[in-house]
Amino acid sequence: MSRLFACLVCLLLTAGATAQSKVADDLPAYGERADVMRFADDAAARLGSDVAPVRDVLARARYVPAVARLIMPPPAGTAKDWAAYRRRFVEPKRIAAGLAFWRDNERWLELAEERYGVPPAIVVGIVGVETIYGQQTGGFRVLDALATLSFDFPSGRRDRSAFFRDELEAFLRLCRREGLDPLEPKGSYAGAMGLPQFMPSSILQYAVDFDGDGRIDLHGSAADVIGSVAAYLAEFGWQRGAPTHFGVAAPVEVRDRALMLVPDIVPTFDAAQFAERGARLDEAGARWSGKLALIELQNGDAAPSYVAGTGNFYAITRYNWSSYYAMAVIELGQAIGRQR
């Protein structure tokens, strides 16, 4: 039997679990569900494990109503507001924590830039937006969150249960590789873990042992966190020395603006094409030789904000598929950098 399941029989939820992660005893268990046990059997075969311990793990998973609620999108008609979104993340608490994180880990941040080409401000911005440098890493049992979204994904939005079943299997594989008890790790309602909030598959594929101690620790090793974030961005196309975006005035003509917004965050147009469609780039953007995307950031009832995103802006959105997220990361990192 693998280390992953060695201690399952004797383990219970700790009495000091946070209120967010507590699960009432009378909520549905998964051990009696045929679909869950079929998944356990198939996953065991792919993991090269005995069936019984995998079934035992999943039988201990619990449905968590808060997870099903939190995965839902905002109510229809909720206006996007970049200014409000920015205020949530570019604020004194995160900036102060980011200054301390940068100061304490300057050596690792410089090494990550040297190795992967990703500037410290971007790495610091991501960790700050994700968890305020470890202050908010999530209180749900990862097993429960992933099981809930794998087997009871809520109706009312696009079904992503297949994605979460893959992540659940990746989580079991990760626990086996790292010798973790699958009942113990805590994370977000979506099953993301550690200071950088990596999903299990991302830990398996992209996380690195940056401090060379023989293990990957995204909770306790700032070096591993920094190296893993930089390695992830490099894997998704980060270009050393390139900017993330340029200033731009969007086309005045509605049709031209609409056409340029069709590709969304994917860099598609060169500077000449921006000019042909009436989008006025700043001086640096007009000289840029690569592809750009016209990024629209809505401001509720006020006029939208626009930037011209480069391939590096797009790389940040591979971490979280949102232009608002990418701009928050960039501007938080810049704010901390200015304070330094």
Image: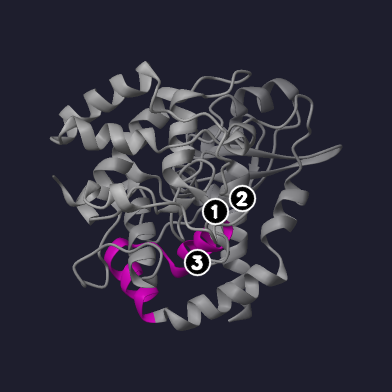
The residue segment tinted magenta is 107-129
Q: Quadrant of residue 158?
A: top right
Pointers 2 and 1 in contact (C-beta within 8 Å): yes
Left-right relation of 219 to 326: left
Mark 1 crowd level (few <14, some 14–19, many ≥20, 10 Å Cα): some
Mark 2 crowd level (few <14, some 14–19, many ≥20, 10 Å Cα): some
Q: Position of residue 179 (x, y in %)?
A: 23, 55
Q: Which residue is mark 2?
A: 20
Q: Position of residue 204 (x, y in %)?
A: 27, 47
Amino acid at circle 1: Gly
Q: Quadrant of residue 301?
A: top right
Residue positioned 41% across, 64% down in the render: 219
Left-right relation of 205 to 230: left
Residue positioned 23% across, 24% down in the render: 41
Relative depth, front residue between 105 and 39: 39
Q: Earlier in the sequence, mark 2 or mark 1?
A: 2
Amino acid at circle 2: Gln
Q: Which residue is mark 3?
A: 124
Relative vertical location of residue 185 with respect to residue 323 in this rendering, above or below: below
**Quarter that holds the N terminus:** top left
Q: Nearer the viewer, mark 2 or mark 3?
A: 2
Q: Is residue 278 visible?
A: yes
Q: Quadrant of residue 258?
A: top right
Magenta highlight on residue 115: yes
Mark 3 crowd level (few <14, some 14–19, many ≥20, 10 Å Cα): many
Q: Secondary structure at mark 3?
A: helix
What's the mark number on residue 35?
A: none
Left-right relation of 79 to 277: right
Which residue, as the protein is rendered here, is positioned at the far right?
A: 301
**Quarter that holds the C terminus:** bottom right
Give the alpha-carbon distance from disc 2 to disc 3, as whole Å.
27 Å
Q: Which residue is mark 1?
A: 139
